[in-house]
Amino acid sequence: MPGPLAGVKVVEMNAIGPAPFAAMMLADMGAQVIRVDRQVAGFLNADGSLLGRGRRSIAIDPRKPGADEVLLKLIDGADVLIEGFRPGVMERLGLGPEVCLERNPKLIYGRMTGWGQSGPLAPAAGHDLNYIALSGVLNAMGHADRPPTPPLHLVGDMGGGAMFLLTGILAALFEAQKSGLGQVVDAAICDGTTLLGSMYYDLRHQGQWGDQRQSNMLDGGAPFYGCYSCADGKFVSIGAIEPQFYQLLLELCEIDDPGFKQQWQQQAWPLLREKLEALFLTRTRDTWTQLLEGTDACFAPVLDFSEAPTHPHNQGRGLFMETAGVLHPAPAPRLSRTPAQAGGLVRNGENTLEILEQLGLSVAQIDELRSVGAIV
């Protein structure tokens, strides 16, 4: 069964971070994605990467004579363009939104940056950690007595970046069905991450969230919401927020200390956390798992990347799959009638001649591109 985006044509200008992840998800959902790879002194970026699955690839240097017109022909037939360069790069290549939308008015032009297309920092370099630092979100993560903890690049690149790029593209595709017109999607990691923090800004406004790390319910301050070390050096997670779940946790752990009745007394939290730390150190992670997993105590063992694929729940849900001998996460979310499917891996440039021929280029034109170094 074709995926829900079958028939949607996407051109992806190869970049790093959230843009290729967004393109991967579109490909998983059935879109026809052509990735434009640029060969620089023999270097092939992300060749054969799992994030590059499900595409076809054309390797062409857009700075060489004639390459821009080839790429414009490719974009002419696309529904979506994804680019993840600094503001102005696509314009300098002759592939900016004004040019592309004039030629293809229905095009959804997806732009993925860290700082956005406008604002004082727009032209500056940066990475995920810098973008989420300005959102207020990074300052809330980590231990109270140390600098904020970098939360991998899931919060910024993937959450605040790729997911918002996808949301904008899909919304614009839906709108284009009614208007017949495309538009530019300006997706910025700093924008998306700030919006992801909406609930925390609301809690702060209500006086229910403080700026001090590890002093709040969801940042490790509450003893009933956090991670604990076990006797074997591994960890467990506890999330027993609701009173009935908290009470069950106490019962299963045979905790009869009256101090634990002060679940919502914030001044009691540091001492209660110390007591739970001592308790969880008395048994191994697997022993705690046998006791608490699957109950309403809101418990899960903390698994590493090698352990996660073997957990019974993850296996039961089919969360992982194998491609070319590599175990990796399977597509998500799950659609009942038109499910997503992971495509095969692609070598950079392996479809170059095929794509050029489909664009109608003659043998002489292809040879000319090769002679000027636009293709190899």
Image (cartoon, rainbow, N blue to C red):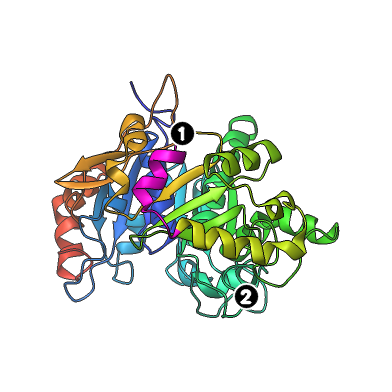
Q: Secondary structure at mark 1?
A: loop
Residue with the mark numbered 1 = 294
At 50% from the left and 49% from the top, the residue drawn is 103
Residue 326's disc is: none
At 67% from the left and 79% from the top, the residue drawn is 120
- The percent position of residue 197, horizontal first and vertical second, equals 67, 58
Q: Amino acid at mark 2?
A: Ala
Q: Is residue 112 left or right of residue 256?
A: left
* Residue 337 quadrant: top left
Closer to the camera in the image, 255 or 65: 255
The quadrant the C terminus occupies is: bottom left
Q: Amino acid at mark 1?
A: Gly
**Residue that protrudes farthest toward the right in the picture:** 206
Residue 266's place in the image compared with 354, above or below, is: below
Residue 4's place in the image compared with 20, above or below, is: above
Closer to the camera in the image, 225 or 258: 258
Task: Write the start and end of the magenta stretch as one range.
Answer: 281-294
Q: Secondary structure at mark 2?
A: loop
The answer to which of marks 1 and 2 sits earlier in the sequence is: 2
The quadrant the N terminus occupies is: top left
Residue with the mark numbered 2 = 144
